[in-house]
Image (cartoon, helix red, strand yellow):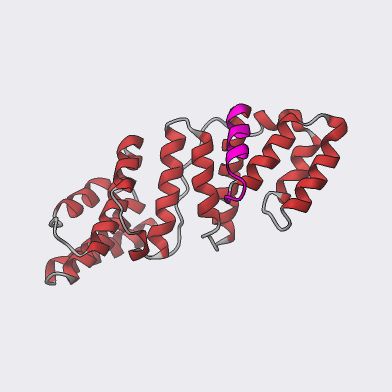
């Protein structure tokens, strides 16, 4: 709950004040992460500003992710992307922060009105998620992005990206948006053969029943998905 998270964040903040570096840096980053999760953004910003520039590379990368998250919450997607580009070695980061990177990238491109780039980030994120609800939410957002992307952009992506995590999604969206009713069944069978076990299978039934409604299937407002679990 929010109250529990706030209490935990304040505990880490107190620990940061009582300990010496580098442990204090670790606690400060943990507190900032939790404060951001419950929209105590000013508290998080102050904690991040207290960190020196010459901290451990892992801590630097975590700070970049959290600064990107604060920028996205402030609806500054260009700043979000800039902070993400400051990350030089994401392998230093835990899965929690690596998931955040793709969620933030997706959210930034959604705010910038670039649905294909956002979908690509969500496709990479989807391969990292294990929580069933997180995966379902992420896939719904990915699919809704493809619903509002220009067909020409989807065709361009499909022509130049054969084997990325987004490829199957894009090809499915193109089938539902461009195939004639008479050819739809054959095209979907071919897609199923090319992409066995793809999560997009769950979307075929409802969309193939009314492919003309695909573009109108989702609300205009897209939420930012960040994984709820993990530290």
Please give the name of the residue rendered at 11% of the width and 71% of the height, measured from the top-left corner.
20
Q: Position of residue 93 (x, y in %)?
A: 35, 63
Q: Position of residue 198 (x, y in %)?
A: 68, 54
Is residue 75 visible from the viewing direction of this image? Answer: no
**Up-down: is 95 above or below 35?**
below
Judged left or right of residue 221, residue 36 is left
Classify the position of the N terminus by image quarter.
bottom left
Please give the name of the residue rendered at 67% of the width and 53% of the height, measured from the top-left corner.
199
Examine the image and state in which quarter residue 197 appears.
Answer: bottom right
**Up-down: is 84 above or below 212?**
below
Q: Assess whether residue 153 is covered by the magenta stretch.
A: yes
Judged left or right of residue 43, residue 168 is right
Count of labels in the image = 0
- Nearer to the camera, 68 or 189: 189
Q: Main secondary structure of the magenta part?
A: helix
Judged left or right of residue 188, residue 128 is left
Please give the name of the residue rendered at 15% of the width and 57% of the height, measured from the top-left corner.
51
Name the residue furthest front: 160
Name the residue furthest right: 182
Examine the image and state in which quarter residue 187 appears.
Answer: top right
Q: Which residues are magenta?
A: 152-165
Examine the image and state in which quarter residue 60 appears.
Answer: bottom left
Classify the position of the C terminus by image quarter.
bottom left
Q: Position of residue 70 (x, y in %)?
A: 30, 45
């Amino acid at each position: 709950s929010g109250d529990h998270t706030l209490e935990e964040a304040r505990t880490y903040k107190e620990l940061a004040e009582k300990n010496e570096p580098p442990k204090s840096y670790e606690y400060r980053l943990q507190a900032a992460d939790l404060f951001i999760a419950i929209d105590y953004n000013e508290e998080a910003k102050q904690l991040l500003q207290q960190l020196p520039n010459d901290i451990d590379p892992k801590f630097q990368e975590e700070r970049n992710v959290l600064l990107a998250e604060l920028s996205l919450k402030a609806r500054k997607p260009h700043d979000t992307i800039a902070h993400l580009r400051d990350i030089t070695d994401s392998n230093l980061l835990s899965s929690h922060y690596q998931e955040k990177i793709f969620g933030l990238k997706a959210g930034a491109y959604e705010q910038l009105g670039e649905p294909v780039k956002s979908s690509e980030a969500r496709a990479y994120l989807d391969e990292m998620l294990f929580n069933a609800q997180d995966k379902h939410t992420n896939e719904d957002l990915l699919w809704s992005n493809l619903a509002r992307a220009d067909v020409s952009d989807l065709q361009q992506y499909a022509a130049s990206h054969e084997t990325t995590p987004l490829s199957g999604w894009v090809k499915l969206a193109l089938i539902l948006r461009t195939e004639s009713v008479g050819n739809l069944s054959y095209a979907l069978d071919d897609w199923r053969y090319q992409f066995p076990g793809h999560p997009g299978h769950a979307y075929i039934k409802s969309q193939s029943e009314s492919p003309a409604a695909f573009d109108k299937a989702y609300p205009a407002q897209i939420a930012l998905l960040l994984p709820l679990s993990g530290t």
